[in-house]
Amino acid sequence: EMAVAIKTLKAGYTERQRRDFLSEASIMGQFDHPNVIHLEGVVTKSRPVMIITEFMENGSLDSFLRQNDGQFTVIQLVGMLRGIAAGMKYLADMSYVHRDLAARNILVNSNLVCKVSDFGLSRFLEDDTSDPTYTSAMGGKIPIRWTAPEAIQYRKFTTASDVWSYGIVMWEVMSYGERPYWDMSNQDVINAIEQDYRLPAPMDCPAALHQLMLDCWQKERNERPKFGQIVNALDKLIRTPASLKTVACVTPGISQPLLDRSVPDFASFGSVDEWLDAIKMGRYTDNFASAGFTSFDLVSRMTAEDILRIGVTLAGHQKK
């Protein structure tokens, strides 16, 4: 016996939607790699039509990381990134351009193995206009925050544009599922990228990994690394863990001024309560107050022991 995942089309689908849905299965059926989701079979003779794949216990990578904020070692996170890069190298070698590489389209099994999923047009079939991720352009939809500028501007989708998206996935992984570009509008993201702004390093992210992200976000697509080079670079970092000790300093530079949002400036808040709310730590307001940390001066001098003592026990929250 084995557990499987079953994907079906909602009732009332058209013949064209059925064809598009099954085209995803025919694409997936050509792939055989430990970091690409495996097709087990399709059901077409009875209704509803079904795509049957291997079952991934931990679900999609973005929500899995958010549920486990701060719980993994850097080496574990780099291992996940290495798996995704290996899956993408395989797809690129098969001349397949994914176009929608994002943490929400990576699945994770019980051994933390990450597999690339979501092939084909089926992601556009659900009539979900509420999803701000996708913006219509010339009849198709593009996930702006994950997409290379040349693919947004003139729909030039290549393996190199997948590499750009991979850089965003790296950022999602190292920030435990934070939304790329936070609450900026899609248009603001497009303008920022055009002006050469790039996402800053997530908190405690090794400098070598942020540099690899910036390489993936080169404006000229020919200057971006190939997936094979990314796999090799990550393997090298895994073999020499000391190389991951240097943490990227988050200083506003050419890559950051607009996007350096990772550490809110105390000066822009009227009270410790307001600041805690802004960094999504409002649940600790009473803890800070009852322990006497009522001014920014006192908060700025807190030690790791103080933070633990007042009850901030989640690693991800301690980092904030």
Image (tube, rainbow, N blue to C red):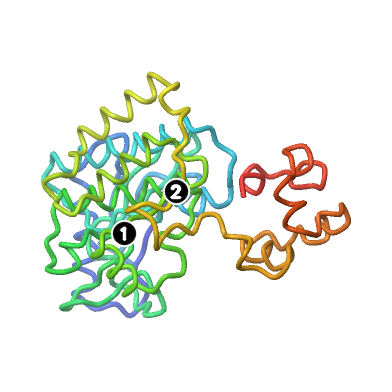
Which disc is residue 234 wearing? none
For residue 193, above or below residue 70:
below
For residue 272, above or below residue 186:
above
- In the image: residue 74, left or right of residue 105: right
Residue 20 position by quadrant: bottom left
Going from the N terminus, do you reach mark 1 or mark 2 first? 1
Tell me where residue 143 appears, x and y as whole percent. Answer: 30, 66
Q: Nearer the viewer, residue 38 or 107?
A: 107
What kind of element bears circle 2?
loop
Tell me where residue 112 appears, x and y as whole percent. Answer: 47, 36
Residue at image x 20%, y 73%?
140
Are circles 1 and 2 on residues that touch, CB within 8 Å?
A: no
What kind of element bears circle 1?
loop
Q: Mark 1 Cα within 10 Å, few/some/many (few <14, many 20+)? A: many
The amino acid marked with disc number 1 is Tyr
The amino acid marked with disc number 2 is Thr
Residue at image x 78%, y 61%?
285
Q: Nearer the viewer, residue 13 or 151?
A: 151
Residue at image x 37%, y 59%?
7
For residue 134, above or below residue 266:
below
Tell me where residue 268 appears, x and y as whole percent. Answer: 60, 68
Q: Mark 2 Cα within 10 Å, few/some/many (few <14, many 20+)? A: few
Tell me where residue 231 appears, x and y as whole percent. Answer: 27, 32
For label 2, the residue is: 251
Spatial CA distance of label 1 from label 2 is 13 Å
For label 1, the residue is: 197
